[in-house]
């Protein structure tokens, strides 16, 4: 093998190593600069009437699609204990269902399970179910949900 071919190979490997380390570093630097220049804005939210308390018996659940297009699931664990979560699994977007006997949310697609607080119990979901603030006013159940972007 000639020394020219060996030198070319060394130069190629050195340039490849440099590109593999410098390019991701520049990407991280650019993302940090962008985060500094464009501050985070929390999503806009709206409070919507979800249901009547009388239509959600204790120890039951009910799926909803609110007027803003959010897919939700509400559970009522006690007299004034109503919790509302996204009904979309954080793994691959399947719909979760409430299992009363196991007292958990279950994703049938990949056997993901979430507890009554929306936290992951088992399975592949990488994050808890998003939960939403609930306000009870008389027989009305209001929930604060994110507005969908147009």
Image: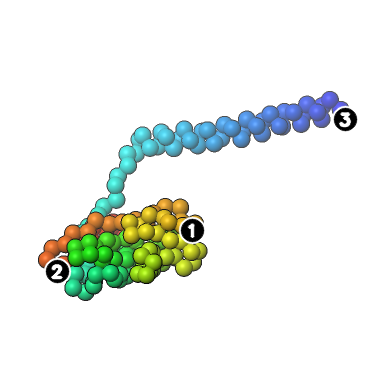
Where residue 146 appears, as percent x and y from the top left, is 28, 56
Q: Callout 1 environment at 10 Å: few (<14), some (14 to 19), or many (20+)?
A: some
Residue 77 position, x and y percent, is: 26, 64
Q: Is residue 97 above or below residue 34?
A: below
Q: Which residue is label 3 attached to?
A: 1
Which residue shows up at 13% across the image and 63% down it?
137
Report the front residue among 15 and 69: 69
Question: Quick one: SS at disc 1?
Answer: loop
Tally of marks: 3
Which residue is denoted by mark 1 in the rendering? 123
Q: What element carries label 3?
A: loop
> Which mark's residue is nearer the viewer, 2 or 1?
1
Name the residue beneath numbered marker 2.
139
**Residue shown at 32% from the left, 42% from the top:** 40
| 92 and 17: which is toward the camera | 92
Q: Residue at x 40, y 37 (%)?
A: 34
Of labels 2 and 1, earlier in sequence is 1
């Amino acid at each position: 093998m000639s020394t020219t071919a060996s030198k070319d190979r060394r130069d190629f490997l050195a340039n490849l190593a440099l590109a593999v380390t410098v390019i991701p570093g520049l990407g991280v630097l650019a993302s940090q600069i962008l985060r500094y220049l464009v501050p985070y804005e929390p999503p806009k939210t709206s409070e919507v009437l979800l249901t009547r308390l009388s239509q959600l018996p204790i120890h039951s659940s009910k799926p909803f699609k609110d007027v803003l297009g959010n897919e939700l699931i509400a559970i009522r664990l006690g007299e004034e204990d109503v919790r509302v979560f996204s009904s979309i699994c954080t793994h691959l977007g399947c719909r979760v269902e409430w299992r009363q006997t196991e007292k958990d949310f279950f994703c049938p697609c990949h056997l993901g399970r979430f507890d009554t607080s929306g936290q992951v119990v088992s399975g592949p979901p990488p994050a808890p179910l998003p939960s939403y603030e609930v306000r009870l006013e008389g027989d009305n159940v209001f929930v604060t949900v994110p507005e969908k972007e147009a």
